[in-house]
Image (cartoon, rainbow, N blue to C red):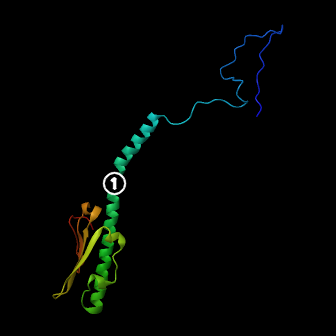
Amino acid sequence: MRLKFRAPAADSNGMRKNVSTPRSARPWLPAGVHRSRSRGFTLIELMIAVAVVGILMALALPSYTEHVRRSHRSEAQAYLMAVANRQHQFLIDTRAFAALANVGVAVPAAVSNHYTVTLELAAGPPPGFSVVATPKGSQASERCGVLSIDQAGTKGADKTGCW
């Protein structure tokens, strides 16, 4: 790239004039190149952004955690309903309820990771069962607690309004 230099200004006698050049005219820079201020973020701007993200996380994280717990509870409720439906089908076919292993509905990983599912059978006339899902791990602090359903379709939980 070829550098272009400005020739000093001269008057009619050929003497150099004392002409001050504007600050922006820098003859040592190539044509079309301008020095600009350094671009980027200042430390204050960065700290403000970090503070805003921290406040948003403090507000959003509890809500997100509660939403995840509710979704795990919904999966457990769906599984309990599926087991109850299979138990009624088994009762129609064999006139008795089956153990959890014989029902034919495998416990999904999403349910087994957060709940311990048990099936209690009542042998007496009339036969009965109760499927119970006890929360474990991070789900243990969930507000509804233990979920259950029995042969009559009665749904139970530690708190009302959870089904």
Q: Is residue 132 above or below residue 162?
A: below
Q: Quadrant of residue 92?
A: bottom left
Q: Position of residue 142 (x, y in %)?
A: 26, 61
Q: Residue at x 26, y 67 (%)?
A: 135
In the rendered view, tell whether residue 27 sits above or below residue 14.
Answer: below
Q: Quadrant of the N terminus?
A: top right
Q: Amino acid at mark 1?
A: Ser
Identity of the residue drawn at 28% across and 81% down: 100
The quarter of the picture where residue 24 lies is top right
Query: Compared with residue 107, is residue 70 higher up or lower down, i.e. above or below?
Result: above
Q: Residue at x 33, y 66 (%)?
A: 72
Question: How far from the left and from the top, in percent, is residue 163?
Answer: 27, 68
List the single residue furthest toward the left: 124
Given the current orientation, which residue lies at the most extreme top position?
13
Q: Which residue is label 1 attached to?
A: 63
Q: Nearer the viewer, residue 130 or 28?
A: 28
Count of numbered circles on the image? 1
Is 123 in front, or is 39? 39
